[in-house]
Amino acid sequence: MNVDYALLTDLYQITMAQGYWDAGKVDEQACFTMYFRDYPFKGGYAVACGMAQLADLVESFRFSDDDIAYLASLDAPGGGRLFDPEFLEYLRALELSLDIAAVPEGTIVFPHEPLVRVTGPIMQCQLIETALLNMVNFQTLIATKAARVCRAAQGRPVAEFGLRRAQGLGGVWASRAAVVGGCASTSDVLAGKLFDIPVSGTHAHSWVMSFDDELTAFREYARVFPNNCILLVDSYDVEQGIKNAITVGLEMKERGERLAGIRIDSGDLSWLSKMARSMLDEAGLTDCGIVLSNDLDEYTIKSILDEGADVMSFGVGTKLASAYDQPTLGGVYKLSAVRATPDAPWTNRLKISESAAKLTTPGVLDVRRYYQADGHIAGDMVFDVNAMPDEREVIVDPLDDLRQKNLQGLRFETLLKPLAQEGRVVLDAEGRSAMAARRRAQEGLEALDESQLRILNPHTYPVGLELGLNERRRQLVAELRHIV
């Protein structure tokens, strides 16, 4: 998508950039880490997403002549122009030289561990902060909601069609994130074209209402789309709609065609689907499926299936594409280390807060994921890449250092992978593919314990700091608070 990513930021990022420039700090190096603090939807995991759009940001990041002209027009509240003309000329010539590492899209992730690490000139790190958070926060949220919905569907295909209720053009990326999270398709045609993801859809109530009667509407639709015929039966009366669909289905059967399904979009979906199944089977249309929609989410889908409804697939819109029950992931982007030049050693940085949950972790961070012998994941270790992890391989809960877990001897992999090096994107086609990310998410969910997959009150997955990192953080806190 053609977006002016350079200005997709908060104003204070650009005012700080001028401050770094004026203070002679443009070459000072920094490391920032993006992570989130709590599980979305009160669940037990999240599905990382948004990294493909982050790659787009890096590739297209430039301050155009129009951008510079706009910034030059801004006035300072106290009078005069806000930005120095020489600084704006610096921006005009700026090219990113950042190194970015991120978990691959579709990776199952947890609170208090890095999803993205950005290193390079501190001014550049700040200039991409807002857009990075916008992309990864939102898309991770939607992918996670999709994973929950699809798991509730117990293997039945889920189609995402929430674009009309989504928050503006963000709905296009929501459609992609929904597929990453497990949806089989989207109704969003633009997303299908841009991201090479499956699209699906049939007709709306207006199709039926445009004809003098429902039966004629169904017959015409079957005539035009004999190989993609799912009839929406609740425009007037569901029972009569099913009867009309059966009439058309039998006519199609005589022509050697097949009525693929009916869709119910209102009423008591569980009860109506059972009635529909009985009517269809009695008419001999046993291969005609039932599609349910209408403000569905993981809880209503689970309830419908628990009641024994025979459903072919689900259509989920508003509550998926808008992350209806949780509007934001709450991910943050924090400075964790600085150095004067690219060759100098890193100096740790840490933010102290009155809230223990907001205490940051210092260092150039990465994550080790440990696996049990049966393939299930056992725990994640956050560690500093510039310090050898303690050989005991114990992780310490970042919110309670008395909670620890020993992972010694277990197989592990390191999660953060290069996304950009010296400002150049290094993701290959596989790394940007929504369908590859979808497969990765499915494999990751299978590696979770059932207790961590529960919709309600899931078990907490262990994520902790490496022993040495935890000790360095403790010492730095003591120094900053002047504790002897």
Image: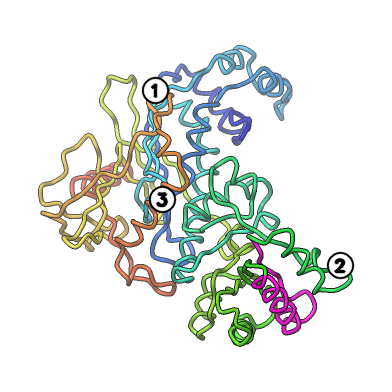
Residue 236 seen in the current view = yes
Residue identified by numbered label 2:
211
Whether the residues at callouts 3 and 1 have beta carbons within 8 Å, the answer is no
Percent of width and height locating residue 382: 27, 48
Dot 1: within a 10 Å radius of its alpha carbon, few (fewer than 14), some, or many (20 or more) residues? Answer: some
Residue 484 seen in the current view = no
Residue under the image location 45 percent in, 67 percent down: 42
Percent of width and height locating residue 32: 40, 36
Whichever of callouts 1 and 2 sits on the residue coming sooner in the sequence is: 2
Q: Amino acid at mark 2?
A: Phe
Q: Dot 2: what SS?
A: loop
Q: Quadrant of the N terminus?
A: top right
Residue 422 is labelled as: 1
Above-or-below relation of 124 to 176: above
Dot 2: within a 10 Å radius of its alpha carbon, few (fewer than 14), some, or many (20 or more) residues? Answer: few
Which residues make up the magenta segment? 228-254
Q: Amino acid at mark 1?
A: Glu
Whichever of callouts 3 and 2 sits on the residue coming sooner in the sequence is: 3
